[in-house]
Image (cartoon, helix red, strand yellow):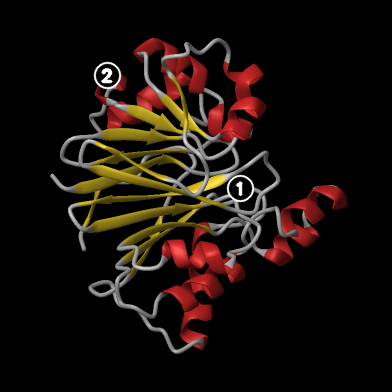
């Protein structure tokens, strides 16, 4: 089977991704109710009993809403760093000591044939992280909820065969939107969310080694973005940098806030 994944849901209402290798299946974040996450997993023929662990990026509700209930139901280990555990403890309810696993930021571990590496990102949470997954020589990276792509994050994302990258908002739509200015300033800031333009600029720097075959644009704002606009903006930024893509060489792919993406096999 190799390394494959499906983004169950992605957006401000909830986030969750299933990553599976030949011997391990894990869930990254549980941002909707446990019942809804199970329904989305069933659409991709995955059960909670198939999961080996849950990995948490940070404690915001759109990433942990159903975490406690799902973990308790299936007695799943939960991996997060100490600051994230401290910040989310009161929101997830009672979790047994045997399920509470500490994975420091900027560390790596192996779960059967799946290598998982966390890396620190810039977001207004206790200690937010992204994750890279490797198996059989293939690499998948998840990078959402970050105000900007630092040099260190860029180094982590290099050589990703598939990348799930935040493309949260169109700057003009956000500026003209109904949010109060303090929230707009938070989203636009270095600990907020990546704009379409910023996502394109990050990709322009990343797509130089030829390793990346697909990029999934993720965590789109329902208020201040549209998928076609995000894809067009990112494409224009890439083309301005002399990077042109074709479906058989490199593709921009969609995620959804309410339905899972098809299973995608990650190849080196």
Tag shown at residue 222: 1
Tag shown at residue 72: none
**How many numbered discs, if any?**
2
Give the foreground label among 1 and 2. 2
Element under label 2? Answer: helix
**Residue 235 appears in the rendering:** no
- Badge 1 local density, few (<14 within 10 Å), some, or many (20+)? some
Tell me residue 144's x, y (percent): 53, 51
Tell me residue 14's x, y (percent): 54, 35
Contact between marks 1 and 2 (CB within 8 A): the answer is no
Q: Quadrant of the C terminus?
A: bottom left
Q: Residue at x 64, y 26 (%)?
A: 86
Q: Is residue 142 left or right of residue 202?
A: left
Q: Residue at x 27, y 34 (%)?
A: 25
According to the image, label 2 marks what residue? 49
Image quarter for residue 47?
A: top left
Q: Quadrant of the N terminus?
A: top left
**Residue 137 appears in the rendering:** yes
Q: Residue at x 62, y 20 (%)?
A: 89
Tell me residue 120's x, y (percent): 56, 51
Q: Is residue 220 above or below residue 195?
A: above
Q: Earlier in the sequence, mark 1 or mark 2?
A: 2
């Amino acid at each position: 089977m190799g390394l494959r994944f499906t983004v169950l849901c992605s957006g401000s209402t909830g986030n969750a991704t299933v990553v599976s290798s030949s011997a391990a299946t894990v869930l990254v974040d549980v941002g909707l109710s446990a019942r809804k996450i199970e329904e989305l997993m069933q659409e991709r023929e995955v059960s909670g009993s198939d999961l080996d662990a849950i990995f948490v990026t940070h404690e915001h509700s759109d990433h942990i809403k159903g975490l406690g209930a799902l973990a308790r139901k299936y007695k799943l280990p939960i991996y997060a760093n100490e600051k994230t555990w401290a910040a989310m403890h009161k929101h997830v309810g009672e979790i047994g000591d045997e399920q509470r696993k500490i994975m420091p930021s900027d560390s790596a571990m192996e779960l059967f044939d799946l290598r998982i590496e966390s890396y620190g990102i810039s977001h207004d949470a206790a200690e937010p992280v992204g994750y890279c997954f490797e198996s059989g020589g293939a690499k998948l990276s998840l990078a959402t909820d970050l105000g900007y792509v630092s040099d260190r994050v860029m180094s982590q994302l290099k050589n990703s065969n598939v990348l799930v990258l935040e493309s949260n908002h169109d700057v003009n739509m956000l500026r003209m939107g109904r949010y109060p200015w303090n929230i707009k300033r938070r989203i636009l800031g270095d600990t907020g969310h990546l704009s379409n333009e910023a996502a394109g600029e990050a990709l322009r720097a990343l797509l130089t080694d030829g390793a990346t075959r697909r990029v999934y644009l993720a965590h789109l704002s329902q208020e201040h973005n549209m998928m076609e606009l995000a894809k067009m903006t990112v494409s224009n930024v890439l083309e301005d940098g002399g990077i042109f893509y074709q479906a058989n060489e490199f593709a921009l792919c969609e995620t959804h806030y309410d339905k899972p993406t098809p299973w995608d096999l990650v190849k080196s």
